[in-house]
Image: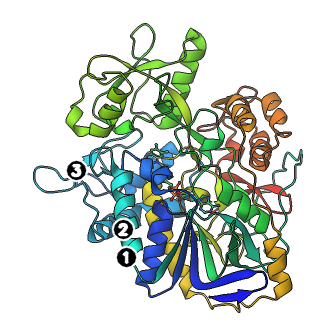
Amino acid sequence: MSSTAAGPVFETEIAVVGAGAAGLYAALCAAREGASVVLISATPLAQTASYWAQGGLAAALAADDSFELHLADTERAGRALVRRSAAEILVREAPARVEDLQALGVRFDGDRSGRLALGLEGGHSVRRVVHAGGSATGRRVVRQLSALVAEEPLISVFERARARALWTDGNPTYPTQSGFDGDRTHTADSRADVDPAPARCRGLICDDGRIVSARAVVLGTGGAAALWARTTNPPGSEGIGLLLAHAAGASLADLELLQFHPTAVLGLAGREGFLITEAIRGEGATLRDAAGERFVDELAPRDEVSRAIALRLLESGERSVGLDMRAIDPAHFPNVIAALREAGLDPMRELVPVAPAAHYMMGGIVADLSARSTLPGLYAVGESSCTGLHGANRLASNSLSECFVFARRAVLHALSEEPSPSSASPAELETLQALPSPSPGTPVTREALWRDAGIVRSAEGLRRLLDDPHPLARLLARSALARTESRGAHQRLDHPKPDPALDQHHFVLTADGDGSWQAWA
Ligand SMILES: Cc1cc2nc3c(=O)[nH]c(=O)nc-3n(C[C@H](O)[C@H](O)[C@H](O)COP(=O)(O)OP(=O)(O)OC[C@H]3O[C@@H](n4cnc5c(N)ncnc54)[C@H](O)[C@@H]3O)c2cc1C
């Protein structure tokens, strides 16, 4: 550590922001390569989406499964927007990451013959979801990885520290409001990072003034679904990493593509938005409307099930549909059953009131197949990134696998690059100290996003969002207005059908305010 008039500067090889699945694993992979790491996490462990994950992680491990089948399911769910090269990497590397997690001490659930027990979730044609503690997968994985991080001498943890801004060679600017709708510039580049990037990321500054100088910064700051009023996400998931990256010069993509989880609890005090894992539908739970009738294939991809529920609720004027779990073996999902009982409902005897809630952001910081952002020296992994892997609708349980597969790729790539000189002038550090934090979301923004950027949207509502005080809401509105079609999680009243011209096209917003369509190979 060195000290300047502007505050202490910590020097490290890799700075990781975020202690969810992606950040923890990135830090451990870097340390295993012998690199020093500073890991910065704003929230306690129990407030990461990773900790809350229930179902598990998808990997083609069963005898009746294959990479090809996992890829086909991922592409089918993603509605002609999945970037095949990224999905191929995911399906091929996920099994090795499961093995590595086991080697790191994560104990996944087994079947009677001692093999991994595999769950079935919506959109998967075979059983392929590896889980731990029934539906306590995230908790088990995060606890184990955190324990290893705490013991690792090469990793310094800044707990409850918030990255306030990224440190670049250039001059960071914060995104400004604009009514730009985007034109359709079609490019067929082999990499997503086609925008010119004048600066290099050299580190970051935390809210408490500590500066970290690093060979590379890896953002694992999670998604943004907590910016919607009705959400399954923990309060910290507000897309702060996206704003940090964009302010520093990195491009964002697919912001309009937000997945809604079909079965989030509604109207149970203390459990509002509590997610009931899709694996329960995989074991036979059914959805019932007000008349007690089934109305959708419960194991269809998420966008289809969420849309069916939203439309049924619009027709009936009800606020929720019923999830019938009465035939489920409670021993398989102990924490879900316990949570519902604590809220005063017995799911073994009565239907659980559920409705869709904002759940997962497919869009994020543009990242190539090594998780490089468009800003040299900056990597994005996990839910904060957008490799194009999930297309317009993430296949259930592909996201935890993505965290592990791409966190490792990011670190290996970052360590293979030539280190750049990291000394900074006192004036540069003073400038860094003066940078503001991105503002958190307010209830006004949350209500506005739920109303105007929910499952069902229109140009009129999206135009209102262009005036929202929150910069991410405005960027999202620009992207959603540009996508003049309905696809995956995103249903436009004024453009009810998919536009085949937009197949495989991602809407990319550069830091200098340009928006364009890109096709990623
Ligand atoms: C209820 C629920 C259930 C889910 N179930 C599954 C499932 O079964 N399978 C699956 O594949 N996916 C599931 N998902 C999605 C999956 O959990 C997430 O996509 C994934 O865990 C994201 O991991 P992450 O490491 O990218 O981010 P997170 O786990 O959200 O971690 C983000 C981290 O970044 C930190 N952070 C953010 N901003 C800053 C900042 N400025 N400075 C410092 N730190 C910062 C946070 O404090 C946190 O530590 C579920 C999500 C939810 C909400």
The residue at label 1 has a CB less than 8 Å from ligand 1: no
- In front: label 3 or label 2: 2
Q: Residue 93's spot in the image, x, y percent?
A: 40, 67
Q: Quadrant of residue 8?
A: bottom right
Q: Secondary structure at mark 1?
A: helix
- Work out which residue is located at the far top of the displayed protein and give it: 291
Whether residue 252 sits left or right of residue 435 in the image: it is left
Towards the viewer: 131 or 174: 174
Q: How many C-alpha atoms fall within 10 Å of the one at disc 2: few (<14), some, or many (≥20)? A: few
Q: Is residue 355 above or below residue 101?
A: above
* Depicted 91 relative to depicted 224: above or below: below
On screen, residue 235 versus residue 401, left or right, reads right
Between disc 3 and disc 1, whose residue precedes?
3
Res. 117 mark: 3
Residue at x 64% of width, y 49% of height: 238
The x, y position of residue 414, in whole percent, is: 57, 81
In this rendering, position of residue 78 left or right of residue 147 = right
- Residue 70 or 159: which is nearer the viewer? 159
Residue that label 2 marks: 147
Residue at left offset 54%, top offset 12%: 318
Quadrant of the rendered image containing residue 426? bottom right
Q: Residues within 10 Å of mark 3 (few under 14, many from 20)?
A: some
Disc 1/disc 2 C-alpha distance (Å): 6 Å
Q: Are marks 1 and 2 in contact (CB under 8 Å)?
A: yes
* Sequence order check, earlier mark of 3 and 2: 3
Label 1: which residue?
A: 151
The residue drawn where x is 87% and y is 54% is 176
Question: Mark 3 and 1 residues: CB-CB less than 8 Å, in contact?
Answer: no
